[in-house]
């Protein structure tokens, strides 16, 4: 009788927990005081702190967090322009996809964050983050059927099923990865491109 040798394969994940920054609401914060000039530096510090802790962060999620700290429910066009002007003054790194994503100057993205602690909508997850999860899936499987990859990526970010919006976002990342030569499509399967 022969015994097979047990080989342990260490599959380290590039998944990290999402670290949310807790903003302290400004005293006298409301939908009018957010426009006052003397509060501009407070808002700059809040935006910078959120971006430093949570980068990459979508414009919609960043605005939501700032507005909560200012006891304001939604951003109309005036408030959108106001916050946009403040962000331009800070000179934060930005990438544009279906919406802007803001990055800390020292962000090197070699991981993706799970949705266990802070539930982010699919449109609030940077495509660069999804790409890391996609590359990890292809690395672990060598090649994976595209439909299965979509389901896997959705589950990875805490979504039980792939609805239209999630499908659109994930296909955008896959298409971008194919166009950039990171992966290739072959018979409805995704695999690393030959280098």
Image (cartoon, rainbow, N blue to C red):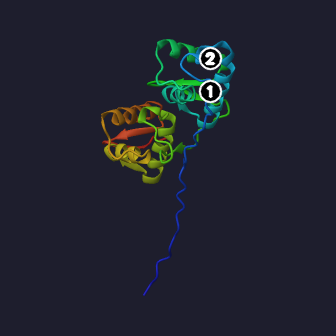
Secondary element at image label 2: helix
Indicate the position of residue 179 as horizontal and vertical percent values.
43, 30
Where 126 falls versus 18 (above or below)?
above
User: Which of the marked residues, 1 or 2, is nearer the chain's N terminus?
Assistant: 1
Q: In front: 68, or 54?
A: 68
Q: Could you classify mark 2 by the number of other residues whose Cα lies within 10 Å: few (under 14), some (14-19), or many (20 or more)? A: some
Q: Is residue 108 visible?
A: no
Indicate the position of residue 163 as horizontal and vertical percent values.
31, 38
Check whether the beta carbons of the residues at disc 1 and disc 2 lie within 8 A of each other. yes
In three-dimensional space, the C-alpha distance between marks 1 and 2, rounded to whole angstroms, equals 9 Å
Where 194 falls versus 78 (above or below)?
below
Identify the residue shown where x is 64% and y is 31%.
104
Q: In front: 27, or 185?
A: 27
Q: Could you classify mark 1 by the number of other residues whose Cα lies within 10 Å: few (under 14), some (14-19), or many (20 or more)? A: many
Identify the residue shown where x is 58% and y is 43%.
19
Identify the residue shown where x is 46% and y is 38%.
120
Is residue 82 toward the left or the right of residue 189 in the image? Answer: right
Q: In front: 92, or 26?
A: 26
- Give the quarter of the figure containing the N terminus: bottom left
Q: Is residue 76 visible?
A: yes
Identify the residue shown where x is 61% and y is 32%.
50
Indicate the position of residue 115 as horizontal and vertical percent values.
47, 44
- The outermost residue toward the front is 28
Is residue 29 toward the left or the right of residue 169 in the image? Answer: right
Indicate the position of residue 60 as horizontal and vertical percent values.
48, 26
Where 109 falls versus 2 (above or below)?
above
Where 2 falls versus 22 (above or below)?
below
Label drawn at residue 47: 1
Q: Say which residue label 2 marks.
A: 86
Is residue 151 toward the left or the right of residue 48 in the image? Answer: left
């Amino acid at each position: 009788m022969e015994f097979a040798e047990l080989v342990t394969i260490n599959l380290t994940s590039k998944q990290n927990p999402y670290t949310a920054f807790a903003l302290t609401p400004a005293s006298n914060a409301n939908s009018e005081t957010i426009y006052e000039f003397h509060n501009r530096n407070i808002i700059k510090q809040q935006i910078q702190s959120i971006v430093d802790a949570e980068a990459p962060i979508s414009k919609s999620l960043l605005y939501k967090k700032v507005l909560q700290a200012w006891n304001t429910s939604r951003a109309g066009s005036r408030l959108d322009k106001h916050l946009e002007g403040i962000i331009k003054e800070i000179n934060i790194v930005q990438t544009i996809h279906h919406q802007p994503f803001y990055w800390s100057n020292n962000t090197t993205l070699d991981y993706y964050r799970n949705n266990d602690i802070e539930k982010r909508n699919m449109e609030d997850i940077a495509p660069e983050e999804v790409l890391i999860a996609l590359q990890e899936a292809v690395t672990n499987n060598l090649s994976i059927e595209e439909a299965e990859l979509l389901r896997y990526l959705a589950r990875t970010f805490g979504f039980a099923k792939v609805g239209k919006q999630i499908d659109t976002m994930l296909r955008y990342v896959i298409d971008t990865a194919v166009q950039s030569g990171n992966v290739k499509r072959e018979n409805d399967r995704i695999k690393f491109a030959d280098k």
